[in-house]
Every structure is written in C-alpha cells, then in structure tokens.
Image (spheres, rainbow, N blue to C red):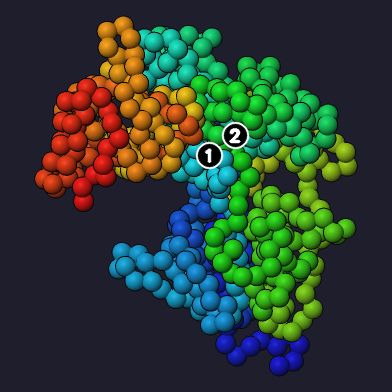
Amino acid sequence: MSAGAAPATPARVVVLGGGFGGLYTALALERLAAKGAAVEVSLVNRENYFVFQPMLAEVIAGDVGILDTLSPLRQLLSRTRIFVREAEAVDLERRVVTLGAGLTRRTHEVPFDHLVVALGSVTDFRGIPGLPEHALPFKTLADAVRIRNHVIHVLEQSSEERDPEQRRAMLTFVVAGGGFSGTEVAGALNDFVRRAVRDYPSIPQSEVRIVLVHSGKRLLEGELTPQLAAYATTALAANGIELMLGERLASATPGSAVLSDGWRIRTRTLISTVPSSPNPVVEALGLPLVRGRLDCEATLAVKGADRVWGVGDCGLIPMPGGRPSPPTAQHAIRQAKLLAANIVAHEAHAPLRRFAFSGLGKLGALGHQRAVAELPGGLRLSGAPAWLMWRAVYWWKLPGTARKTRVAISWLSDLALPPHPVQLNLGGSRGTAQAHYEEGETVFNEGDAGDSLFMIIAGQVEVLKRFGDEQRAVGTLGPGEYFGEMALLGRDPRSATARALSSLDVLVLPASDFSALAGGLPEFRRGFEEIARRRTDANAVPSAPDPPG
C-alpha cells in the first residue's frame, strides 16, 4: 500500500474507558472518519455517560445538580459503537476484548486492530488496615453521591443524639490527603456542612469539625509553587478546617481514624483521597508498567506491543525533556487528539507525531469562593479572582450547550438560595461486610441494640459482663468464632460488651440477613440457639464451637 492510501477495509479501533482520554479519542476518530479516514470505532465503558470529574466536589456541596456533571455517551458519539459493560480481559494474541456478562449472562468478544487503553486508575485502599471497610473513596460520581448522602444522614442522626461525646464524633468529618482532590473535597464539605447545620437548631455550630490530614508541611506541596501552597494552607485553616500536617492515616475503624503517631480521631465519616492504583485489566495485559502505568512512547504507542496505545491516567507518556505527562484532563484531551491522528497515520504508513504539550497551568478550588491558579508565564492568582477563573475555565470545558446552561443556572441559584440537604434513600440492604477494629476499641456495649452477628477473621475479642457495679471479663474469642447472636435471637439489647484485645478483623452479618437465614434454615437457627443457651446457663461467653452447617 502506498503512503497516504486508504486500506480496503476500515481499521477496527476499540477504546477501553469513557473518561477524558477515551471519550476524546473516540471524538477525534469520528471527526477523522468524517473526513475520509477508514476507521471503525467502538468504545467500552461501564456506564453509558461521561463524568466531568473536576466538578465532583461541587456535587457534594450541592453547588451543581447530580446530573449536571453527566453527558450521555450516545449523544456525544454518534458514529461510535458503544458497549456498556465491564472489560474483563484482553487477548493480545487473538486481538479480542472480552466483555462481562449482561442480562443474558453471556460474555461478549469485540475484535480489534488497534486497542486504546484509557481505563484510568481505580481506588486502592490496600495496605492500610480498615480503609477498604470504613473509608469513603472519592473518585466517581457514585462516590460523590454516597458521600453527600452519608453526610446528610450523619446530620440527621446527630441532631437527635443526646450523648455529647457521641454527637461530637458524628460531627467530626475527616478527609485524608492534601492534594488537589483532598483540598477540594475538604473545602466543599466544609461549606456544605456549615451552611446545612443552620437547619438543625439542636446542632451547635461549634461542634462541627472538618479535619484534613496531610503528610506534607503544606497542602498542595509539590503540586503548586510554595507561595500558592502556603496560601491554600492558610485559606483552608481560615475557613475553619482543622489541618493535621505531617501526619498519615495508619488505619481506620467504624468509629475512628488512626494516625501514624497513634493519635485517634473519633469520627463516623472518613473520606480518603489516597493515590489510586492501575486498573486490574491494565495489570493483566502483561505489558511494561512504570509505577503502575503503561510504559508508552511519546507517540502514545505502548512499548513492546503491536498497535496498543495508552492515554490518560493509565499511560506513562513522556513530554519534551523526558518528564512524564501528569494525569490531568487537559493533558488527556490533547493526548487523545494526537492518538487519533497517529492511528490514522499508522494505517496510512505515514510518520507518527510525538506528544509535545507542556500544559496550560493548574487550578484548584478551596471552598468559600476561593481558589488558586498557576498559569503559564509565571502568572499566579489566588482568592476570589482564581475562583472565578476556576469556574470560567471548567464551565467552558463542559461538553454541550445544554450542560453549560444547566450548570450556569445551578451556580447562579446557589449564590442566592440556601443549600438543599435532601438525602437520596436508594434502599437496599447493606449486606455482609468486613469491619476492622484496633486494640482496645469496643465493638458494642452491653445494652446496645442488637443489629449484627460478628464472625472473627483475625484477632481476639474479650467479652465483658456487668455484675452489679462491677464489670468482669467472662470469655475470650478468637478466629473462626462468633459473637453477638444472643441479641439477634431474642431481639433483645446486647447482654455483654465486646472489646478488641488486638487488631481485629470481623465479618459482619446484618440482623436482616441473619433473620432470613434463621427463618429459612431451621438447623441454622437451632445451632445458634443451642450455643446461646449454653452461654446463658454459664452466665458467661466461653469460646464457641464452629457453628453448624
């Protein structure tokens, strides 16, 4: 085939991921196809929409509506075949992508000539005990909605809590991570909670605590110039956010965030913006990785792979001078346009271009109508001017006129109207889950409501019972044993206190699930009733044998 000649059949391009990198690659390929390029584009994404992630913190604060950050993929990509499924595996030899089963419970294979990997990164709480079980991640729209619902639920519960110590713990909100995500979440959360509590006369404003934990000496350290980082640190503190600098999150439990120096912050809300990890599909490709990202040429081709390309967060793409391209939206968009052109050039046996974009600056919102901006040419802004620029830039980048209009209306109404603290009760059981407790923490107290059965995975539990004015230890339980069944069987308050003797991991079975099993499996219920009878007769809680069946 001669240079510039079109192939006899269209090249099949499969794009994995519908974020900035994936969406804009498909858009650019559509434009090139409209000009005559012989490409056939398919996009695989777990949702049928594109999320404008820079505004997710504003969803928590209620500054924009939940749907205002979304754009339907089928409206944006009219010439692309869209698969709303999980990409489960990639076979580079057969050149097919295997998609997860849908309603038919059958997997589906999509063949490709070119594969664009734009899967970004995923939340990874591994390595910090209790974080997967008890921290709220902040990465997706679902995360933002979940955080907002949880915060409103906490306000409702604390408004009727009479125990001052419990109420203070409920009204303490901890954010871990002082990068752009952490500072934006902390600022938005602080604005929302402090405005929302005006609707709760029983909650003293002075009891609301927003705590930001960061390992550096300043927020946004290394992200911005020292002057802007210092401004961001001072601005958040001036807004009433309590900064714990030089600290790391060491573990999490249902009722506390434990810091690296051993200090425990009693809280029922922990939001973590710790660094993410590669998507498991990227790891399973067997291709070269550097710090968890695909090792790419400046042309965006993955090293050592045939017609496999990386874009966005999951690709380590060198810029002029050798520094890796940062995982930002502005870089992903420009990578995507170059990648689309290089795929067409590859098919035409034409030279490939190299990525040479150095960036247009950095913007970060701090809440309370303040922001920081670092722009090319050494221009730096902070405070209200930077906040206006932040809004103007991201409003302009929103895809579609309808989306821009909705967001503009939301922002204008937010300036005059109070927040709308409505909790979206989406229903559903919380299901069986794991929980982590640190040594000395109480799992439940005698007299508490019986709402769960606990099965020990690792660690030990001390069981204490009150006899008159004295509380005595009456038993110790270890891995494979369970506790908490008495209150569930009789629907009575807890008859003893359970406390962690060491670092403890348990499987928690909610009362509703326990009742369903006990009602449907008579042997299951009789086994627990027999153990409960023995424990009651002994007026203690000895180590229990394995539960039947």
State left or right for residue 43 relative to residue 383.
left
Instruction: Note whether 286 is above or below 470 in the view shown.
Output: below
State left or right for residue 501 relative to residue 181.
left
Q: Where is residue 301 in the image (x, y as percent from the top left)?
A: 71, 71
* SS class, disc 2: strand
Looking at numbered disc 1 in the image, what kind of residue is underneath it? Answer: Pro
Looking at numbered disc 2 in the image, what kind of residue is underneath it? Answer: Ala
Q: Where is residue 456 in the image (x, y as percent from the top left)?
A: 37, 39
Q: Residue 404, can we see it? A: no
Quarter of the image with the N terminus is: bottom right
Q: Position of residue 376 (x, y in %)?
A: 84, 43
Tell which of 52 and 28 is nearer to you.
52
Local crowd at mark 2 within 10 Å, few (<14), some, or many (≥20)?
A: some
Which residue is the site of mark 2?
250
Instruction: Note whether 67 is above or below 201 in the view shown.
Output: below
Tell which of 191 and 543 is nearer to you.
543
* SS class, disc 1: loop
Tell which of 463 and 319 is nearer to you.
463
Q: Residue 505, can we see it? A: yes
Q: Residue 129 carries which label?
A: 1
Tell which of 245 and 191 is nearer to you.
245
Q: Do callouts 1 and 2 mark residues in contact (Cβ within 8 Å)?
A: yes
Distance from Cα at disc 1 to Cα at disc 2: 7 Å
- Residue at 66% x, 79% y is 306
